[in-house]
Amino acid sequence: MTIAAVRTHRLSAPLHTPFVTALRRTTTVDTLVVEVIDSDGRSGFGEAPQVWKVTGASVAGAEACVRDMLAPAVAGRDADDLVARCAEVRTAVTGNESAKAALDVALHDLAARRLGVPLVRLLGGTTLRVPTDVTLAAGDAVELAAAAKQRRAEGFDVLKLKVGTDAATDLDRVRAVRAAVGPGMRIRLDANQGWTPREAVRVIRGIVDAGLDVELVEQPVSRWDLDGLAWVSDRVEVPILADESVFGVRDLVEVIRRRAADMVNVKLAKCGGLHTARTLLDLARAHDMGTIVGSMMESAVGIGAAASLVAAYRTTAVSDLDAAWWLAWSPVRGGVRYEGATVVLPDAPGLGITSVTEAKVQHRG
């Protein structure tokens, strides 16, 4: 059975709440969904989210990469030879990891559909329920405290607080959130590269001295500053989670070599898909590093793939899979849903996606 066609769909959907970090502010999910169709007419879906400030990926760039380079690499080839097809995707171009991830996931989704099993089953797992944290977008202390109370009422028990916008007041933000939710909730911080190494150590030590009980701190310094990341990790007791510093296997090897972080955040759109993501999780485990699987601002397509990976491979801490929860409405039919702090995978073949709603593209003359 061969791959008959590869199609792309531009999707855009509003968020119910603006998503603000030290790197960016967005009110929409803008993404490219890739559809792989076999000669029997079955479809598999994958996603390449537009994240200019993190991956550099855009909808237009991912679409061009898929159309001109990735689709020709797999078109007309055996749809059942998943390992070979994914290898062809990985070697077709340099970079463009988000586009590669979209096609890699679509091939996995198609393979699972052809077998009539959920994607998690194809990956070797059984559970259809995966816990997630929820992000508190960057804001002032009062706003964050109110949002934290609301998330607790909605059933979440792990909060990821976006900091790094102002090191001088970040401690006050953490203090306000802890006071709002009490001692029972886990709080983790994500600075999104927003601190210098000295600021990171000062803020983290202040949090510890204040007894605010932070679970981990994600990417405190610039992604390129591995020396600074290692310097911070060596001077604080709170676990340091590498995110933007690790896109692929070579990045993680270097982080391990330098002992620059205690944990790693594996994201499909950073590393190029499920094949490389599994390698990263195995490598981290072999070196006693903690793991989570994260997400960009994505739809149920990307979140379904990431949650299926967690369900099959497990992580050492609750993963970051709340992206589709932020959507005011879903641009796809089927797929994952949320029950409080749980991502529920559909008991359906593949990702369970049945259709997508394309965005209206404005052509500029």
Image (cartoon, rainbow, N blue to C red):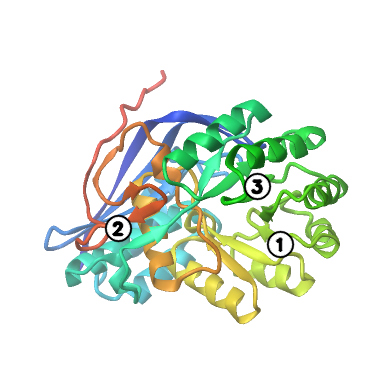
Q: Name the amino acid, label 3.
A: Asp
Question: On the image, which quarter does residue 327 sit in?
Answer: top left
Q: Name the amino acid, label 1.
A: Pro
Q: Nearer the viewer, residue 166 or 281?
A: 166
The x and y percentages for residue 282 are 54, 77
Residue that lies at the very extreme toward the top in this rendered image: 365
Q: Name the amino acid, label 2.
A: Leu
Q: Which residue is mark 3?
A: 190
Q: Is residue 179 above or below residue 281?
A: above
Question: On the image, which quarter does residue 42 sit in?
Answer: bottom left
Q: Nearer the viewer, residue 77 or 300?
A: 300
Q: Tag 3, which secondary structure?
A: strand
Marked residue nearer the N-terminal end (1 or 2): 1
Marked residue nearer the N-terminal end (3 or 1): 3
Task: Please tell me which residue is depicted at 20% across the width and 68% down the height of the picture.
Answer: 2
Q: Which residue is mark 2?
A: 345
Task: Please tell me which residue is depicted at 30% across the width and 63% down the height of the picture.
Answer: 128
Q: Tag 1, which secondary structure?
A: loop
Q: Quadrant of the C terminus?
A: top left
CA distance separating discs 3 and 1:
12 Å
Q: Do the numbered discs 3 and 2 sit on residues whose CB atoms are within 8 Å?
A: no
Q: Is residue 14 above or below residue 158?
A: above
Q: Which residue is mark 1?
A: 239
